[in-house]
Image: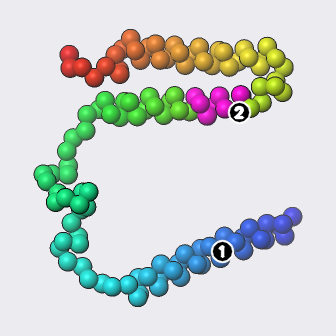
Amino acid sequence: MLESYFPIFVVISIAIILAVVLLSIGKIIGPKRNNPEKLTPYESGMDPVGSTRTRVTVRFYLVAMIFIVFDIEVIFMYPWAVSFRELSGFYGLIPMVTFVLILLAGYYYILKKKALDWDEE
């Protein structure tokens, strides 16, 4: 049983050893010319202006969380769509319709709460 996993362990070991060796060689051989210009943050080729510690509005996080929820919806729908023919017709459709209706109810709630409305009130 364990013998069948031996090639996988060998490949993973070789990958780890190769990564460590190549990173070590780069660290040893690479130039070490640190100067203040090289240590500044890179902002699209322009000099940094202002503080990098600016506050971000909570709405960005809210939109990100909503995106993740609806993105996971697609992850659940894809296997269902692939195996739809193997499901027993109407009985395979009922759970997905229920799932989509629950998600639409959540979307309706988001719209009613105006979570996606960016206008200042």
| Dot 1 alpha-carbon crowd within 10 angstroms: few under 14, some 14 to 19, many 20 or more | few
What kind of residue is marked 2? Pro
Residue 96, compared with residue 77, is above or below; it is above
Residue 9, compared with residue 66, is above or below; it is below
Do callouts 1 and 2 mark residues in contact (Cβ within 8 Å)? no
The verdict on residue 9 being magenta is: no
The residue that mark 1 highlights is 13
Residue 61, disc:
none
Give residue 53's position: percent from left, percent from top: 20, 49
State whether the magenta stretch is mostly helix, strand or loop. helix
Image check: 1 left or right of 109? right
What kind of residue is marked 1? Ser
Secondary element at image label 2: helix
Q: Which colour scheme is used?
A: rainbow
Which residue is most to the right?
Answer: 1
Which residue is most to the front?
Answer: 45
Give residue 50's position: percent from left, percent from top: 12, 51
Secondary element at image label 1: helix
In front of the other: 95 or 29:
29
The verdict on residue 78 being magenta is: yes
Residue 44, compared with residue 78, is above or below; it is below
Give residue 106's position: percent from left, percent from top: 49, 17
The residue that mark 2 highlights is 79
Q: Which of marks 1 and 2 is in front?
A: 2
The residue at 23%/72% (across/down) is 38
Which quadrant of the figure contains the N terminus?
bottom right
The residue at 47%/85% (across/down) is 25
The residue at 72%/74% (across/down) is 10
| Disc 1 from disc 2: Cα separation | 34 Å
| Dot 2 alpha-carbon crowd within 10 angstroms: few under 14, some 14 to 19, many 20 or more | few
User: Which comes before the other along the chain, label 1 or label 2?
Assistant: 1
Q: What stretch of residues is rendered in magenta?
A: 73-81
